[in-house]
Image: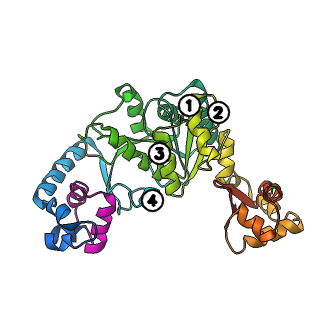
Amino acid sequence: METLQQKIALSLIPGIGPRLVRRLVAYTGGVEAIFDGKKPVLEKIPGIGSGKAAGFNTSKLLKDAEKEIDIISKKGIKALFYLDKEYPARLRECEDAPTILYVDGEVDFNVAKTISIVGTRKATDYGKERTEEIVNYLAGQHPDILVISGLAYGIDIAAHKAALQANLKTVAALGHGLQLVYPSVHRKYAARIREQGALISEFPYNQAPDPGNFVSRNRIIAGLADAVVVTESGERGGALITADLAMSYNRDVFAIPGKSSDTYSKGCNKLIKFNKAALAESGADIDFAMGWKLETKNNSSVQKALFVELTPEEEQIMQLFSESDELAIDEISVSLSRPVARISATMLNLEFNGLVRSLPGKYFKKL
């Protein structure tokens, strides 16, 4: 029977990250089998080889894992293995999801709606206001929504503070072990997050902050969410990395536009310009684009939308959706031999009638 000690030991193997851990488990048939196996067997697994197998010091790994268990058990911290039932289902979908996720707090990661909000550490009043507006709006519409960010200066802490103020559950993904809070000035907010959500990390308890760790934790912020919102960002930075990761995980990405001359709106404008994010001016825009707003309507209003009288062109478009739930506007334009501008107007009308929903990248989904 596999043990927590073995699971944590897997996450500590030098040179073997989450992807290779999954391959090890798949090839050997389970965690226990890895520790029962011989190095010559491990060497034959694609991506492992003799070099990585040499670092598989079973005795040391298990001893280090035992020390980790001793620490977290005293601190009341949970260690979730990626195959555990309690592990966040959305994050598990990502092939590079952490092997072990350490959780300090109590939160249901698998609630119906989750959103990650990220941005520059040098947030302006505009960025903070937009962040607060989004959180407050979503809190009013969806009081069970989970807000995720990274506890950093600027937009991250603004998102956490707004969530705490709105009495929402919030999760902070850290780029170091759970022994400390970085930056230390956010210690009081971290304490509240523990009570109203959780602090999480893939790193052992005593792992110190390191620049590379913060880039790594961005994939957790992206993977936990249904949608990632960038409220303010320069042309480069962690928020844009998180947006790219979210796209790779097939998550919805939104960006708040700003003046072209504003330094910390350039990143958001760039995401929108290159179709990496949908433009969102408010929480209501995000709510509508995600289809969450439609879920709050009563059945009678939905039924009414289903029986609206369609034009011949609208009927043709809806017929196309009978073959695929999602279509690009270019596909619809080619299929009907109509210009994109005309199709755009028709799609807007169908969206108003609650029959389709717009998605990032000029795609539409049948409702």
First to last magenta residue range? 1-30
Separation (CA) of disc 3 from disc 1: 15 Å
Magenta-highlighted stretch: main secondary structure? helix
Residue 162 percent across, percent down from the top left: 54, 33
Vertically, is 234 above or below 98? Answer: above
The residue lying at 32 percent from left, 65 percent from top is 22
Which residue type does callout 4 highlight? Ala
Which residue type does callout 3 highlight? Ile
- Residue that badge 1 annotates: 264
Separation (CA) of disc 2 from disc 3: 19 Å
Separation (CA) of disc 4 from disc 2: 34 Å
Which residue type does callout 2 highlight? Gly
Q: Earlier in the sequence, mark 3 or mark 4?
A: 4
Residue 53 lies in quadrant: bottom left
One can see residue 224 in this view? no
Residue 96 percent across, percent down from the top left: 38, 58
Residue 16 percent across, percent down from the top left: 26, 58
The residue lying at 21 percent from left, 67 percent from top is 49
- Residue that badge 2 annotates: 258
- Residue that badge 4 annotates: 89
Q: Earlier in the sequence, mark 3 or mark 1?
A: 3
**4 or 2: mark nearer the eye:** 2
Residue 276 percent across, percent down from the top left: 59, 49
Which residue type does callout 1 highlight? Tyr
On residue 218, the disc is none
- Residue that badge 3 annotates: 241
Vertically, is 286 above or below 339? Answer: above
